[in-house]
Amino acid sequence: MRPPLCGYAYHLAGFTGFNRLGHFDRLALACRVFGRRLVEAEIGQVRTVLNGWGYQYGQDHDKGVPSVMSQLFLLNRSPHSSDLTNVLFDRVRREDLLTDGGTRVLFAVQRAVAALGYCEAPSLRSTSERAGHAGVSATWGAWVERWTATTTMTHRPRLNSRAALLKAGRWVADQQPEAADPAEWTRQTCAAWIAAVDQMKIGDYVVRTSSFQERIGQPLQAGSKAGLIRAVRVFFRDIQDWEWLPRRFDPQRALALPRSINALIGPQPRVIADDVWAKLLWAGLNLEAHDVPRGKAGPVYPVELVRAVTLTWLFMACARCDFYVPKDSSKGQLLEAKKNLQKMLANIPLTDDERVAVDDGQAALDQLLQRLTDVPTPAGRTPRQLGAPATATLLPIVEVRNGPTP
C-alpha cells in the first residue's frame, strides 16, 4: 500500500520526502503518477548509454537506475530526462535525498544524462574530497586546506586525512573553540582530543550519515580511533617541520596512540575446537592435486608448493605449543614439508619478507623434528639412543625370515 499512499500525498500535499521512507518501490510510484510507458522509455534511454559504456547499471536486471531516476522524476515533477538539470543533481547531493546505494548510482545517471546533452557531466570527486567545512571554523579549515595542498601523501590517504582533520575541526568548534587556530594547541588540547576520540561514537562530528544509519551511536572501532589520532599527529608534525608555526609540543609524544587502543588493533585469535583442528590437520596431511585451484592451463600453484605451505602452517601452529610432541608417523610429512621449503628458496624468486617467512617455517619444522629425538622408532629405541639426528630418515626394522612368508 505504500506507493498508492505516497501517490496521494504527492498529488494532494506536494510530498517529496521519499528519502525518509526507507526502501520502497519508487518505480511503481513513478509509473502510477506519470504512466509506465513514458517512465520506462525515459529510463531506457539512460540504460542504453550506460550499457554502451559497460556499466552494470545498464543491464536489465539492475534496479538501481530505475529507482534513482524514478525519484528524480518525482522530485522534478517531470518524467522527462531532458528536464534533469545540474541544479537538481546538486540539490539531491547537497540535501542527501537518496540512500547510500542511490548516491553511487546518481553519478552514473548524471553522466548518461550529460551524454544525451541535457546537463553537464559530474566532477570526479570522492566522498572524502567532498567532505565540506560545515561546522568547522574558517581558521581551522584554512589550515587543513593548506596542509592538504602541501603534503606529499598519495591521493587516497591525503583525502582520508583531510576528512579526519575536518572531523577534528568540528570537535574543536564544539568543545575547544579557543583552539580553532592550530597555533593555540597545547599538550592539554592533545590530551583532550585523544580522550574525546576514545569515547567517540559512530555519527559524531560528521556531515553525512546516510551510509551508516543502522550503526549510529555504536562505539568507534579501534582502527578508526587510531586513524583520527594519527591524522592530527601527522598534521601537527608536518606544519611544525615546515616551520608554519612555532613548536610548542612534540606531536609524536603528545598525540601518541594510547596502549588501550593499540592493544585492540590487529588479529583477534580464537581458540579452535579440538574436532575442528583435527579436521584441519587431516585435510592438510591428505592434500592431493585435485584439492588445489585449477585454471585452464592446470593448477594455479604447483601442488608441491601448496602442500609445503599447508604443512608449514599447520605444524608451525603446533610448534608454538610446548606440550605438543609430533607422532613418529608425522615425520615423513615434516621432512617433505622441509624439503619443499628448501626447494622454494632455491628455485622460486622470493622477496625479503617471503624469505623470512620461509626461514621461519624451516625453523619451526626443525623444532618439531627435534622433538622426535625421544620418540621411539618401530624397533623400540629412540633416535637419541641410536645416535642419529632427528632429521635423519630411519628405516623401520622388520623381522627377516628364511623361508616363505606365511
Image (cartoon, helix red, strand yellow):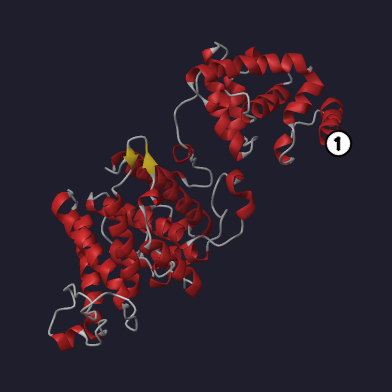
> Which type of secondary structure does the marked residue at label 1 adopt?
loop
- Residue 104: x percent and y percent? 55, 33
229 shown above or below 62: below
Residue 70 quadrant: top right
Q: Is residue 79 visible?
A: no
At x 43%, y 59%, the residue is: 223
Q: Amino acid at mark 1?
A: Met
- Residue 308: x percent and y percent? 28, 59
Q: Which residue is mark 1?
A: 1
- Residue 155: x percent and y percent? 34, 39
For residue 110, side relative to residue 321 (left or right):
right
Nearest the viewer among 238 and 119 is 119
Nearest the viewer among 50 and 332 is 332
For residue 394, side relative to residue 222 (left or right):
left
Q: Quadrant of the N terminus?
A: top right
169 shown above or below 317: above
- Residue 398: x percent and y percent? 24, 79
At x 42%, y 56%, the residue is: 228
Q: Residue furthest front?
A: 403
At x 65%, y 28%, the residue is: 68
386 shown above or below 298: below
At x 84%, y 25%, the residue is: 11
Q: Is residue 312 visible?
A: yes
